[in-house]
Each structure stands twice: as structure tokens, then as C-alpha cells.
Image (cartoon, rainbow, N blue to C red):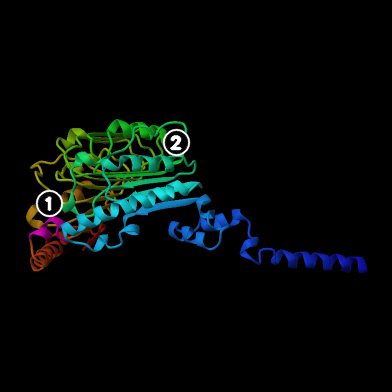
Amino acid sequence: MDRMSDTMQKKHKKRKGDRGKYANLDDIPDDIIVGILSLLPLKEAVATSVLSSRWRYLWRFTRMSLDFDVDHVTPKYGTLTCLIHVTKYLNKNRKTYIRWVNEVVDQHSGAIESLRVCYYLRRRHKKHIDRWIRFGLRSNVLERLELDFSERYPFCNDMKRYLYKFFPNFFCVKYVGFKTMKVLSLRHVSIRGEEIEYLLSNATLLERLVLEECQNLSHLRVCGHSLALKHLEIVATGRNLRRVEICDLVNLVSFYFKGDFKNYARNFILRNLPLLVDFHIEFKLLFLLIIWLVQVPSYDHSYSDRNRHNWPAEVPNCPHYQLKEVEIFSYNYFLGDMERVLYLIKHAVALEKIIVNCKCNQRLKRFKTKQQLFEAEEISKSHAMTQLQPQIPSHIEFILR
């Protein structure tokens, strides 16, 4: 009995000792501290370096998501409205931003899960940008890479030829980041269609691709059964883009496209997208959306902007058996929108919900007063309620906004 009592006392002392093992910060192993610091944002993790000489360098070995956003260096940027003030402010703080990113890149030695660079940078900053990208791509756990070099204000638009040119030397053995990457976002970057194809062939795990205002992107082809791509977003409001081909993406569930170019019927190709359920498209020749419905047999959400120019006198009879929800933006009965809605109702035989949004187009807000916009929206709402809604079949949910 005494022997058992002694054993219990020893176990109790051992448990008591375990509870007090990390009574002080200095007793905590470095790997545990690094793991905790990895949960903090970059700014807070770096701030711990002043706690003691031991903590000074621990943040460098963290596994982090690095977000170098313009607002972290230039907090007043979003409050400026004058073009002259915006330009001066950006030029003044650009060196500060570049120095900040370079300091982190120089000092950090841990793994990188995501890298986001967001500032108004151009081709002349290529040596810095290339270095940052290489830094991220060396990480074998990189899942997200975002380059956003767009200007926040449309009136401070730089000439397109000065855009940073992405590629072409990032596909060597030491840059393993593409092998693990799941999200790639390129905004206001110069890249060609064949370079995107090559990129996709290397980034086999990529699930989301965002391309916005990419110069030199005249032909875009995203095709292949082997691609893991689930979400695709393309914004091309300029005139460079001439052809888009999205085919055989067996995992694609959402597709967003905004842009204008000639010969849509021939040069905008959607084919074999069996899992597509969310389809958002904005362009001028809206009537061609009807033709594409038969090419995308499974999606059940469609969102369309206005600009309904050149609606043909006779639209082809193209029934659709899967489309379940449609939202029409900037509804205006003067432009014949009621006829277009009724056409969709007739041919989308599985339609369950239709949303009519009467908010005026953003472009009109530049030329009309608030009172004029309000009156126009009220007229459209009144027409939709009195003329359109009575013609909607009872089995279709009608929502007016």
C-alpha cells in the first residue's frame, strides 16, 4: 500500500510539473512560438521582434500569408479625390511601398501560403516585382498569388504599354509554387494568351483564375479535361481581346466575363462545361446570350447587364432545359426589355426565378441628376409591376428590385 501511495505521489508531482513547464515565455520552444506567430497578420508578427533579443528574428521563420496592400502604406489613398493629389501621393509613397516589400522579402525565410502585391506599379518597377514573385514561387506550399497593379481611379489611367510584363522565366525547377497554386489573380498585367496556356499546363491544381485588363491578351484559350479550374473571371473592357475559347473544363462551376469585341458569335466559344452553374456576363450584344444557352447545358444562374443594342428582329428558337434563375440589370421598358424577358421565359422551360433590377446603369449617373435617376427607376418599376409581372407564369418567382 505504501509503495502504491509513493507511486501516486510521484505521478501527481509529474503532472503538476507538466502544468508549470512553460510558466515563462522563455521556456516555450521556438517552434511553438513560430507556430503562434504564423497565426498573426504580418504587421503584428513583426512587432513581436521588440519583445526580446530571442524574439527578434522568430517572425522570419513563420508560415505566412503576405498581403502587401496599398492601404497598409498609404492609408489616405482611398480618401483622395483630386487627380493632382492622387498622383503626388502615389509618387511620394511608391518608394516607401517598394522598400517595405523588399525588407520583408530580404528577411523572411519561412514558408509562404499566399502572396498579394497591390500597388500602382508599372514596367519600370519590373526588377522589384520579378524578385517578389520569385520569392513567393520558391515556397512549396504557395496556394495563392495575386498581382494587382490597377489604379483605383479611372481618371489616372496610365498608358497600357507601361504595364508590368508577367512571365516568362518563372518556370524553372526551383520555382515550385506553381505546382501547389490554387488561386492566381492578375490585374493590369501584360501577358499573352499562349503564356496563360503554358501557365495552366504547369499549375495543375489551379482552381481559380482571374484576369483583369491584361494587355497583349488578344486570344484567350482555356481548355482541357485535365485542368482543375473551378472559377474563371475575365474582365477585358479594351479592344485587345479578339477571341475567347472556354472548352472542356469539366470542373468549372462559375464563369464571369465582362468585355466587348467584334464577331461574338464566331469568337466567343463556350463548349462542354457540364458543371457550370453560375454564369455572369456583361457585354453590348446581349441577345447573343440566347445562342450560347444551348452550348452550356447545365448552368442554372445567369446575370446580364444592359446595353441591348442590335437585338435582332427574329431570334432563333433555342430552348434551354436547365436554366433556373435569371437576373436582368437596369431594366428599361423603353429599350424593349419586356420583350426580352418574355422571350427568356418562353424558351427557358426550367426557369424558377426571374429578378428584375430597375437600378439605372452606372454610366447614366454621370449625366443625370439624382432626381432624374430616381424618376427613371420609379417609372421602370411601375411598368414592370403593371405590364410585365401579370405576364409572368405563376410557377416562376418574380422579384422586383
**Label 2 environment density (alpha carbons within 10 Å; few <14, some 14–19, many ≥20):** some
The amino acid type found where label 2 is placed reads: Tyr
Query: At which x and y percent is residue 139?
Result: 47, 42
* Figure quadrant of the C terminus: bottom left
Which residue is located at x 8 percent, y 62 percent?
368
Left or right: 351 as drawn, with respect to 52: left
363 in the magenta segment: yes
When the figure is inspected, residue 332 is found, relative to residue 16, above or below; the finding is: above
- Residue 285: quadrant of the picture: top left
Left or right: 121 as drawn, with respect to 59: left
Which residue is located at x 41 percent, y 46 percent?
144
The answer to which of 392 and 78 lies nearer the viewer is 78
299 in the magenta segment: no
Q: Which residue is the site of mark 2?
A: 175
**Label 1 environment density (alpha carbons within 10 Å; few <14, some 14–19, many ≥20):** few
Which residue is located at x 29 percent, y 43 percent?
125
User: Quick one: label 1 or label 2, which is nearer the N terminus?
Assistant: 2
Q: Which residue is the site of mark 1?
A: 339
Left or right: 12 as drawn, with respect to 261: right
Magenta segment: 359-367
Query: At which x and y percent is residue 282?
Result: 20, 48
